[in-house]
Image: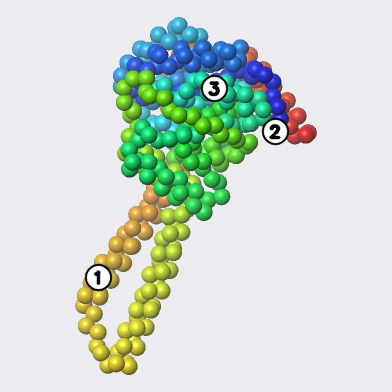
Amino acid sequence: MISRSDRPSSISCVIPAFNEARNLGVVIPHILTTLATMSDHIELIVVDDGSRDDTTQVMQTLCAAHREVVYLKLSRNFGKEPALTAGIDATRGEVVILMDADGQHPVALLPEMLQKWRAGADVVYAVRKTRDDQSGLQVSLTGLFYKLVNFGNRVKIPANAGDFRLMDRKVVDALKRLPERNRFMKGLYAWVGFNSTAIDYQPLPRADGRSNFGLRGSLSLALTGILAFSIAPLRALTLVGLVLSAVALGYGAWVVIEYFYTGIAVPGYATIVVGMMFFSGIQLLSIGVLAEYVGRIYEEVKQRPAYLISQRQGHGLTTQTYAGNSEDSQSRQQESSLL
């Protein structure tokens, strides 16, 4: 690993928000105070994912009070993954931090993350210690998801690691090169690779309100993750087909042997009905799994943008600062290539 300077030239922080107006006024000043101790040039980008509360009014006030705050309002609700993508695309900092708007990600961990970046880590991601705030069903489904998505997959997605992370500029640039529309960010973080290290954290209580991301959203995201980063369902269908074919051949051989050697005529009515219903169910299930993959291919080939921005407000990092960061990043990459 390559050690870095004590203070990065600039830091960008991305916060996706959906109906978090009551939390933003508390969370953002707290984060800005911590970021100011970590770098002389900072920006905090809030991506409004089609909120229906007073998020716009709150953000206009925050942008007027803090020059470092940038407000991006999407044209509608695209989902958290596209909102994160919009924020990442807008960042200019040498270091990029991703956090939630509900205050559950401990700001106190940011200096520790930066310390690991100084030591040479390109990605520092936070892993939950426990899931005490979730139901037993949700915890069980989460564990099952990570087993399924990592089964037979060369790229392993760390279990219990969310979007709370710090990334070097070269990692961010790599993420920006990935064009897919059905985005599963946890998988994309793992796919780009780079030198990564984990730290444990315990989520804090929400600053206010209830989470907008429930079990239904978790299941939808899990399905996207499995279909985007694993062909295990297709392989499972192939295995089921092979097993059923072997069973059918064995059963057919048994019927023939029984007829010729014992003379027992098999009525077969119940066998035929049950067999037809069973194999029809397997075929419909197989078609459904294939349809999920084909549907996502259809979404990709249309090449629609992952998000649309209807409003931008705030200054953030200046163009001059960004240009300086780019030159520093290029020089560091050249130095690392020589080592």
Report the residue at 34% width, 83% height from top. 254
Q: Position of residue 169 (x, y in %)?
A: 61, 27
Q: Residue furthest right?
A: 338
Q: What residue type is labelled 3?
A: Leu
Mark 3 closeness class: few <14, some 14–19, many ≥20 residues within 10 Å: some
Label 3 with label 2: CB-CB less than 8 Å = no
- Judged from the image, the secondary structure of the residue bearing numbered disc 2 is loop
- Judged from the image, the secondary structure of the residue bearing numbered disc 3 is helix
Q: Earlier in the sequence, mark 1 or mark 3?
A: 3
Classify 304 as above or below 40. Answer: below
Q: State the mark number for residue 1.
A: 2
What is the quadrant of residue 302 in the picture? top left
Q: Where is residue 234 in the image (x, y as percent from the top left)?
A: 44, 57
Q: Which amino acid does label 2 sit on?
A: Met
What is the quadrant of residue 214 in the picture? top left
Left or right of residue 261: residue 42: right
- Residue 185 visible to an observer of this rendering: no
Which residue is denoted by mark 3 in the rendering?
110
Which residue is denoted by mark 1 in the rendering?
274
Report the residue at 54% width, 16% height from top. 35
Nearer to me, 25 or 310: 25
